[in-house]
Image (cartoon, rainbow, N blue to C red):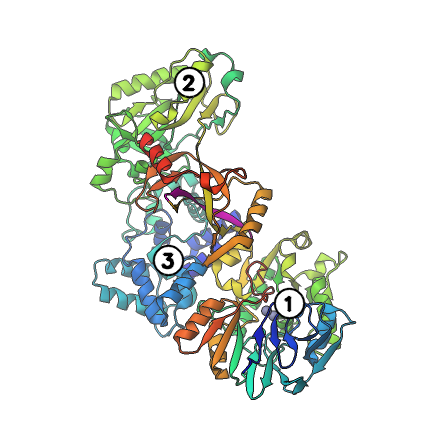
Amino acid sequence: MHQFSQLISDLSHSTKTNEKLELLSRYFSTADERDKAWMLALFSGRRPKRAVNSAQLRRWCQEAAGLPEWLFNECYHTVGDLAETIALLLPPPERGEAPRPLHYWIESLMLLEKAPEAEKQAFIRNAWEQLQPGERFVFNKLITGGFRIGVSQGAMVNAIAKAYGMEGAVVSHMISGNWDPQQTTLPQLLHNHHNNPDDSRPYPFFLAHALDGGPATLGEPAEWQAEWKWDGIRGQLIRRNGQVFLWSRGEELITDKFPEIAGLLDYLPDGTVIDGEILAWDEVLARPLPFQNLQTRIGRKNLTKKQLQESPVVLLAYDLMEWNGQDIRLLPLRDRRLQLEALADSVNQPALKISPLITYTDWDELATIRAQSRDNNSEGLMLKNAGSTYQVGRRRGDWWKWKVDPFTVDAVMVYAQKGHGRRSNLYTDYTFAVRNGDQLVPFAKAYSGLTDVEIGQVDAWVKKHAVEKFGPVRTVKPELVFEIAFEGIAASNRHKSGIALRFPRIHRWRHDKPVSEINTLDDLKQLLEQQS
Amino acid sequence: MQPVLTFTETGIYCPAGGFYIDPWKPADRAVITHAHADHARIGSRHYLCTKDSVPLLQLRLGKDISVQGTGWGETVKIGGAEVSFHPAGHMIGSAQVKVTVGGQTWVASGDYKTENDGISGAFEPVRCHTFITESTFGLPIYRWRPQTAIFGDIEAWMRENEASGKQSILVAYSLGKAQRLLYNLAHTGKRFFVHGAIYNAHQVLLSAGWPLPPVELITPETPKSDLKGQLIIAPPSAADSAWMKRFSPYSLGVCSGWMQVRGNARRMNADAGFAISDHADWTGLLQSIRATHAEKVFVTHGFSSTLARYLEENNIPAEAVRTAFGGEEETTETTV
Ligand SMILES: [Zn+2]
Ligand SMILES: [Zn+2]
């Protein structure tokens, strides 16, 4: 495991993308073959199920180090990461046994999943005794997950491409789908030539710009096509040579995560590429479910029946890029749209819907319609020039997003914490509370929205008015009132307040508002009801 | 019976002797543990410290201060109190201050380190009734590796930089840490190029006779080719500054106890973090406290309430005290 632990340490110290790429590709050129497959699996969402939980790790570490629980907790607050805290607290290693490779540790942990607690404890304690401090950290991370080394799946793909002299898109394709790191090595995976990599290759997405001043400057309303701006995941669905591929905007293959959409394989003709929005959908109300539903589908390796039932997913198509194997991106949008509608009609499956066009006669009418966006669980409108081609990247002029104003509430700051990077000396991360009777209930954390000058003022204020220290967090006198903006609200039993906000941020500092006039938890609950 | 030392607005005060230890406001008589800025402050009428601290105090506070130096373990009578200085191992000249009044002995540790670094003196546990300890690194996550291991890492890092054509720059506090690095890296035979802040302290220490290797001041005229394969040492204030940018490509190694936690190295944009500190680690604090056999411990700057609670739970009566110490390595803000 030494080489892997060294890699993790080097990656976390390197700040430059090039250096990271170099480190990774060196690893993929030199590491143990079985370790390489695991390395890739760990950083492409294929981490094995967790065999030991955090509470167990904490308890066993306290025992091994002979520390009271409160002291362990203080340490954890200071370090901020469980795996690292434990690695720092354990007594020095005993040495003795021969070092073992990464795959040994991962596969041993997998065997532990169903084992009785005593056996788990014995294994973990023994591993801690043998491993060197740097390796202990990595070992703990294998259990807790979240290496946070700033390596995306894209970077991983590039590193493998470099190490094996292959093209990125080919690697990306070869490593997608279901494979088992215990059954295959990386070279086997990469040279499994039953697929033609070109089949999966997506087109670059065309991206919209924010329309700030309103549509008056766009000219004739009739030349523009309006749709709702959906709050889901942008996706590109490809069917070629009897296979189907679903790509995210981050050029990540996500076909496996959305079996409903993958199931369109049987209905779409070969040589079809569709651009659209992946959404969790309410068939009865014919509108998207709240974003939280879609979230339950992301980041899961195995989907449960319950998730599939509660949050069924559809592709809401808004453009057609390839048809009958021909790239049709240079046709005008209105023609592509006609073709798309004909296609959706003939497919006639619930998982493929068309993003409807909004009919309007002038800009004023469209503004009125836009005001109802939230009733459709949408964020506003998209305006697309009906005569435009499908372009690449973020070119200005033909696609605009015209978002609705965010929700806002007035709230008081109750906790402050220091930021990161350039702002690690300043209190920049705040927690806000609303009133509930004579209590204050924290409901949102926000990091952004103030100017540098304001951040300086708030920082100085926090340093003077901190009343309590809880690890890195300062409790402050509830005096500063801010207007908090957010995009959505949902019920949540993980939060004390019972609600979770989407994209909360500081809208402005309300110097004019006393704490007695901030919003209440009931106000938020009302918003929640209006939403669902 | 009146306590030997009390905690006041101005600092730690000895009523029987009428003096303060490391006062943070101007006092008539100041007894100084060591020359760091948070312990030796300007404005007092008369200073008493170790002989080794005198030139450093003059460098810091001005040539014209009224200062008296005393030898290690030598007893000085001040009013009704007997005062002596004992090695604290924190930096050159650093001392614990022992005060005895009417058979009661208190020791104020100042800052201290238990590992002998070769140049800062060997920490000497002093038996006392009451011990005032620092607690900068008073959490069990802070346990240092021996300095030989860390210097081994630093040397390996320097070789690696040289091989990949990068300039090695170490960031270290200019008084204390920088000299510790120089003394322990002297055998590498490298040329040491330093920032002005370190250069000034160095000249004072050389003329006081300390066995430190020669250093060269970096000026705008210093040719880059001279620096190649050699070592630059700079204070934390120079990290990522325009001054530093001109040495690109470089690798920045930060020498500080805070580097024990990975996130801190990342936040400082360090390419390498070396957890080497001039303060005692958790084990060192506990050992030193036990070695004093004190019946009562006051815990100052750092994780004071945490350490005090732990001592209490282990049957050593302890109390956390707020002081105005802290500043060099004591806070992550200054990130040394
Ligand atoms: Zn000091
Ligand atoms: Zn200090």
Left or right side of A440 for A294? left
Residue under disc 2 on the same chain as residue under disc 1: no
Q: x, y (%) of residue A45?
A: 34, 47
Q: Is residue A140 visible?
A: yes
Could you tell me how far apart the alpha carbons at marks 1 and 3 are, in whole angstroms?
Answer: 45 Å
Name the quadrant containing residue B59.
bottom right
Vertical comparison of A312 with A340: above or below:
below
Between tags 2 and 1, which lies in front?
A: 1
| Mark 2 touches mark 3? (CB < 8 Å) | no
Mark carried by residue A368:
2
Q: Amino acid under label 2?
A: Thr
Residue denoted by label 1? B24
Circle 2 marks a residue in which chain? A
Q: x, y (%) of residue B217?
A: 73, 64
**Quadrant location, the C terminus of chain B:** bottom right
Of pointers 2 and 3, the one earlier in the residue sequence = 3
Q: Nearer the viewer, residue B163 or B6?
A: B6
Circle 1 marks a residue in which chain? B
Residue under disc 2 on the same chain as residue under disc 3: yes
Secondary-structure class at tag 1: loop
Could you tell me how far apart the alpha carbons at marks 2 and 1 are, in whole angstroms?
Answer: 66 Å
Mark carried by residue A141:
3
Name the quadrant containing residue B1.
bottom right
> Quick check: is B3 in the magenta stretch?
no
User: Which region of the structure is painted magenta?
Assistant: A425-437
| Mark 1 touches mark 3? (CB < 8 Å) | no
Q: Amino acid under label 3?
A: Lys
Could you tell me how far apart the alpha carbons at marks 2 and 3 are, in whole angstroms?
Answer: 52 Å
